[in-house]
Image: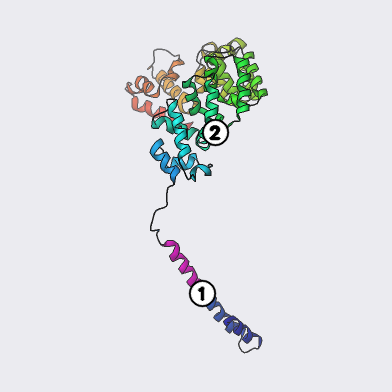
Amino acid sequence: MMARVLWKRVITSQSSLSNAMPSLAYQFTVKYHIAFLNFCTQISTPSATPPDKGLATEFFISNCGLTPQEIAKAFRYSNGVRRANSTQNFEEVLELLKGYGLTTHAQIRRVVLNNPILFSLKAKSNTQSKLALFRTFMKEEDIAKLFISNARVFSSREDKLKSAISLLQKLYGEGQALSQLIATQPRLLRVSEEKVLESFKQAENLGCHKGSKMFASLLRNILGVGKENIEQRLQCLNNCFSEKQVSEILRRWPLILGFSEENLKHHVDFLVNSVGIPLDILVKYPALFGYSLEKRLIPRYRVMEALKSSQGLKTDKIYPGIFCLKEKRFLEIYVDKNPDSSILRDIYNSGKVDC
């Protein structure tokens, strides 16, 4: 009403626009300023009762040893679990886990954090039937590993699982070897048949024997990295080592194929050209490729070079085993027992920072 009167005054020249607008602005300002104050007062009033944590949160805290933060992270994409009106299915899943020897809070906690999807699946109508399938050829301890490492296989269709298991039995045979393979490489049950056949063929072409630990490790790398990347990394190794040496490296440490070509090149360059380790000796220590250049290899190399320059070593050679020592043991032998330990400690620590 006030706005209409003011606007009429402006039109009829009863009041100038400059006189009318301040009054109008004042009315709107006061009105919305009061409303804003009332809104702030409402939201700033503390709640009389704390929010309910929910049945799921309470269950996983008391039965699985998880914290509320861990629960929120594990089930951030599982609204059905977080908003559950009953814990019956959770309890049934827990009983299944206990039936396979997973009884402690630490074990159950690992299952929940690694495979929260297991608690989204119906224990009786889904998980139990697939457990019955796994029990036909797997040992109970291997099924327990499956729960911990990749329970996602329980979300696969049962017909797909049967087809995958049938294929693996033809390729790998039955018995304990197959049980252990699936326990450590459950991805074989979820990838396509073409991918499984391709992975087996590539592992066999590398000279691995079925049933060996090396074969299982190579399968994991091939499935995880992909055929093309594996071939590129093999080519990188062949550019540095002989074919026989590459075979020896893979036999000793197949995990080397999990590292990029750039990483492999940098390690070979440093270990051979800087440290001076001959290729035929490096072949016997392929695990060196798994150590960080910046955090382990270079700092230790600098310490050894400082000892050589001060004649603190009996030999000019740096043996590969030095890099394999645990940090505490390395420092005890080559740093702390030396009269110049403080200087060597600085060299060791600065090596980590500089890199």
Q: Give the total number of marks visible in the rendering.
A: 2
Magenta segment: does it hold 32?
A: yes
Q: Which range of residues does the magenta coloring cover? A: 31-46
Q: Residue at x 63, y 25 (%)?
A: 226
Residue 251 position, x and y percent, is 55, 13
Of residues 147 and 2, the one nearer the viewer is: 147
Residue 128 position, x and y percent, is 52, 29
Q: Do the residues bearing badges 2 and 1 touch, measured as CB atoms within 8 Å?
A: no
Q: Is residue 176 visible?
A: yes
Of residues 68 and 151, the one nearer the viewer is: 151
Looking at the image, the residue that sits furthest to the right is 194
53, above or below 355, in the image:
below
Magenta segment: does it hold 35?
A: yes
Determine the CA span between mark 2 and mark 1. 61 Å
Amino acid type for the residue under numbered disc 1: Lys
Q: Main secondary structure of the magenta part?
A: helix
Q: Residue at x 42, y 50 (%)?
A: 52
Q: Mark 1 — residue?
A: 31
| Quarter of the picture holding the N terminus | bottom right
Circle 1 sits in a helix, a strand or a loop, which is it?
helix
Which label lies toward us, 2 or 1?
2
174, above or below 81, in the image:
above
Amino acid type for the residue under numbered disc 2: Ser
Residue 20 position, x and y percent, is 58, 83
Is 9 on the left or on the right of 184, as rendered?
right
Of residues 319 and 264, the one nearer the viewer is: 264
Residue 15 position, x and y percent, is 60, 87
Q: Mark 2 — residue?
A: 125
